[in-house]
Image (spheres, rainbow, N blue to C red):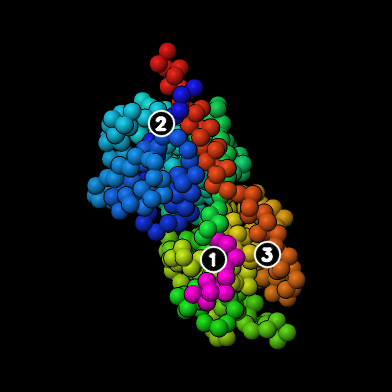
Amino acid sequence: MPATRVLIDLTAVPADRGGVGRYVDGVVAALDGELVLVCQARDRDFYRELAPTATILPQPAWISVTPVRLLWEQFALPLIARRSRVDVIHSPHYTLPFLSRRPKVVTFHDATFFSDPRVHTPFKRIFFTAWIRISARLANVVVVPSEATATELSRYVSRPSGYIVAYHGVDETVFHPPTAQQLSASKSGLQLGDRPWIAFLGTIEPRKNVPALVRAYRSLVAGWRAEWGDIPVLALAGGAGWETDLARELALVRPPAMVRQLGFVDIGHLDGFLGGSLFVVYPSLGEGFGLPVLEAMSTGTAVLTTDRLALPEVGGTAVAYTGVDSTSIEESMQALIADAGERRRLAAAGLARSRDFTWERSARTHELAYAQAALARMVISK
């Protein structure tokens, strides 16, 4: 079978690389074969460096407006695919160009729009549930990041051919145990001060369960014991999504408790921020994969998360687990604070397990998905 020429639509990737952005960048950097990368104009040089053998097609800046981008996807992207003579179109974020007759691969990142709609805005819930159904019907292949996501989606969206699971990876050039110099740079750049810190990384939205984490932290500090050492800061890193309860919980924080909201943290500081923490806590209500957990494991720190959806597929026995209520989170944090030996054990186990998740392995699975989709074109052409 000849090599598959693939167009990847990167125009939905935001300027601030969150989980979806890091997924797309990680896979693109590890893919072999003929690639046509359609991207935002601001990302042209970035993708030229990331994938030097690919054809880069930057698009006008006006498609950065989401409704406009969706119209562009339906009407302009099929023309670009035809002119570029690609065999397959990969749409890595739920939507796809339904007017194109070329084989299509689409990525669904989680099923919580169906399984836990309360953690999304009504608009996002309606938009994404509709598009998941459309894309699942029109795509030749659907890629998902975990077995849990495949199982959840199968309950809501029927697909005779099922789903291809391609686990995410971790970039060890970015996420690794920090050196003393890197740790110092991150502490200085993020103004973390001299107190130890408990780290959270993720978009501040209801699914991440941050208000419960803040309540748990307040209770933890209220019952602090002198033998545990200095009281840590709770440091929250991540862009703002939508959250209705966090401000109220933060208003109740009193010294010696301290919560720092760091906002979006530059990727160059994440190794020091995560790897220099007492531990990372990620009390999510459910994830399609849980990339922040994997990235934290890769920095050589202990991780506390929940056992919801795909998170156990990522953490295995190398992380500590908690319930999602504030009492469970407080008790689990207290156990880790009181047991430095357990933190060291989890840190070592997490670092070892993180090495099983590579973007190269994810890319090979994506290439199989592209090849499978391309067979549909060969069948049609006959």
Image coords of residue 339 (percent x, y): 74, 73
Q: Is residue 235 visible?
A: no
Give me the C-alpha separation between circle 3 and circle 2: 41 Å
Residue under label 3:
347
Residue under label 2:
5
Amino acid type indicated by mark 1: Asp
Q: Secondary structure at mark 1?
A: helix
Q: Nearer the viewer, residue 183 or 94?
A: 183
Q: Nearer the viewer, residue 379 or 214?
A: 379
Quadrant of res 145:
top right
Give me the C-alpha separation between circle 1 and circle 3: 14 Å
Q: Which residues are magenta?
A: 175-185
Give me the C-alpha separation between circle 2 and circle 1: 35 Å
Image coords of residue 320 (percent x, y): 69, 62
Number of the front mark, 3 or 2: 2
State whether residue 6 is above or below residue 28. above
Image coords of residue 209 (percent x, y): 55, 62
Residue at x 57%, y 70% (from the top left corner): 179
State whether residue 300 is above or below residue 365. below
Residue under label 1:
271
Quarter containing the C terminus: top left
Q: Nearer the viewer, residue 372 or 66?
A: 372
Q: Secondary structure at mark 2?
A: strand
Amino acid type indicated by mark 2: Arg
Residue lying furthest top: 382
Quadrant of res 130:
top left
State whether residue 195 is above or below residue 90. below
Amino acid type indicated by mark 3: Ala
Badge 3 vs badge 2, beta-carbon distance below 8 Å: no
**Alpha-carbon neighbours of circle 3 within 10 Å: few (<14), some, or many (≥20)?**
many
- Is 369 contained in the magenta span? no
- Image side of residue 222 versus residue 187, left or right: right
